[in-house]
Image (cartoon, rainbow, N blue to C red):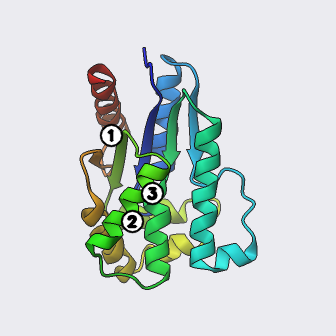
């Protein structure tokens, strides 16, 4: 039995399987636990055009969106399809801050303290060929999806994730059988539950 809420985040480039595997995890754990909530980084979709176009306003919008839902949903098993790491990374990328310093890490840790640090972060990876296939099989492909295939953006995100990698991160390669990937993710979560 989980006494305290557990926050799990799925991170990674577009097309690695964040939505797919976060949904599969929710379905699997719904059979064992009550009050499991799966949320995308933005659940209320009320961002204005001005906020969307300005990287600083956009970042504030997503932080507020995350904060509101964390306050509302205490004592639940919460799974996020992208979390603070993505919001912060996009702010850096869109403001051309591609060189990471300790200041960036301090700012991210400050955000974790202000909102909440995930108990587990799954950093999903796969081949760029597989990502491209996954992206173009989506019903709606946006500019972020297309941009994520550019070499400089792949380089940015790989450097960014290696820079912010911490003890809560687990790297999972999704370029394998879906069952095996899900099994690895479930085992990590169950190990965490057993030891906390």
The residues tagged by marks 2 and 3 sit, at their Cα atoms, a distance apart of 6 Å
Q: Could you tell me which secondary element the residue under label 3 belongs to?
A: helix
Q: Tell me if 142 is positioned left or right of 95 in this view.
A: right
The residues tagged by marks 3 and 1 sit, at their Cα atoms, a distance apart of 30 Å
Q: Residues within 10 Å of mark 3 (few under 14, many from 20)?
A: some
Residue at 29% x, 44% y: name it. Answer: 168
Residue 53 x, y percent position in the rendering: 65, 80
Q: Residues within 10 Å of mark 1 (few under 14, many from 20)?
A: some
The residue lying furthest to the bottom in this view is 96
The residue under label 2 is 107
Q: Tell me if 68 is positioned left or right of 11 in this view.
A: right
The residue under label 3 is 111
The residue under label 1 is 181
Which label lies toward us, 3 or 1?
A: 3
The residue lying furthest to the top in this view is 1
Residue 185 x, y percent position in the rendering: 33, 36
Q: Does the residue at mark 2 contact the one at mark 1 (Cβ under 8 Å)?
A: no
Location of residue 189 with respect to 137 vertically, above or below: above
Q: Could you tell me which secondary element the residue under label 2 belongs to?
A: helix
Q: Does the residue at mark 2 contact the one at mark 3 (Cβ under 8 Å)?
A: yes
Residue 138 x, y percent position in the rendering: 58, 59
Q: In this rendered view, identify the residue nearer to me: 3 or 98.
A: 3
Of label 2 and label 1, which has the lower sequence position? 2
Residue at 47% x, 59% y: name it. Answer: 134
Which label lies toward us, 2 or 1?
A: 2
Q: In this rendered view, identify the residue nearer to me: 166 or 18.
A: 166
Residue at 25% x, 52% y: name it. Answer: 166
Residue 62 x, y percent position in the rendering: 60, 60
Residue at 45% x, 73% y: name it. Answer: 148
């Amino acid at each position: 039995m989980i006494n305290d809420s557990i926050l799990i985040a799925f991170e990674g480039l577009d097309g690695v399987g964040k939505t797919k595997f976060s949904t599969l995890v929710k379905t699997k754990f719904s059979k064992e636990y009550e009050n499991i909530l799966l949320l995308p980084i933005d659940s209320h979709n009320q961002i204005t055009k001005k906020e969307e176009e300005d990287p600083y306003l956009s970042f504030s919008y997503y932080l507020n969106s995350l904060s509101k839902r964390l306050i509302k949903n205490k004592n639940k098993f919460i799974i996020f399809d992208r979390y603070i790491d993505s919001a912060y990374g996009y702010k850096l990328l869109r403001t051309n801050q591609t060189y990471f310093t300790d200041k960036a890490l301090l700012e991210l840790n400050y955000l974790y303290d202000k909102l909440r640090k995930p108990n587990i972060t799954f950093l999903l990876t796969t081949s760029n060929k597989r990502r491209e296939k996954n992206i173009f099989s989506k019903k709606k492909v946006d500019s972020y999806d297309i941009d994520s295939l550019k070499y400089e953006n792949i380089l940015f995100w790989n450097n960014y994730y290696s820079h912010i990698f911490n003890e809560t991160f687990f790297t999972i390669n999704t370029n394998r059988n879906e069952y095996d990937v899900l099994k690895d993710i479930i085992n990590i979560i169950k190990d965490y539950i057993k030891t906390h």
